Image: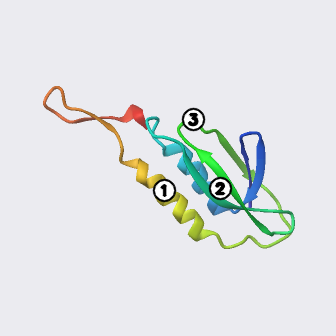
Amino acid sequence: MKRMSYAGGTFVTSDEVADALVHFVAIVPRNRRNQVVIVPGFDAGGTPSPVALVLGPTSQIMSQHEAVSYAEPETQGVADRVREQARSHENTARIDSSNGKANLDYDVF
């Protein structure tokens, strides 16, 4: 499990979901709008509670390992959905074709 820090608050979620959220923030192009991402957070007893995050180009999040007294819940499906939402942004880039050639502007990533 990992503790996520975001917007002055923290929550605990699975390793898969935490890694997917970090991946999401790392690849969202600067020219995209914020998106709401809902993931499971867990209390000290392992009870899930939804956490809604507004993530976008300027989001800053942090994750670190958190020892818990319960087994890590299965959240692969949630992590897959977060990664898919992130992938919908991956292939977006400005294309400069003013010189007759298509050049991707990788600075937008």
Could you say where residue 98 lies in the image, as x and y percent from the top left? 18, 26
The residue indicated by pointer 1 is 85
User: Mark 3 to mark 1: distance in Å?
Assistant: 17 Å
Q: Is residue 97 left or right of residue 31?
A: left
SS at mark 2? Answer: helix
Q: Three-letter amino acid code at disc 2?
A: Ala
Residue 18, label in figure: 2
Q: Three-letter amino acid code at disc 1?
A: Gln
The residue indicated by pointer 3 is 58
Residue 61 in the image: above or below residue 37: above
Q: Three-letter amino acid code at disc 3?
A: Thr
| Nearer mark to the viewer, of 2 and 1 | 1
Q: Are marks 3 and 2 in contact (CB under 8 Å)?
A: no
> In the rendered image, which quarter is residue 55 located in?
top right
The disc, 3 or 1, on the residue closer to the chain's N-terminal end is: 3
SS at mark 1? Answer: helix
The residue depicted at 55 percent of the width and 41 percent of the height is 56
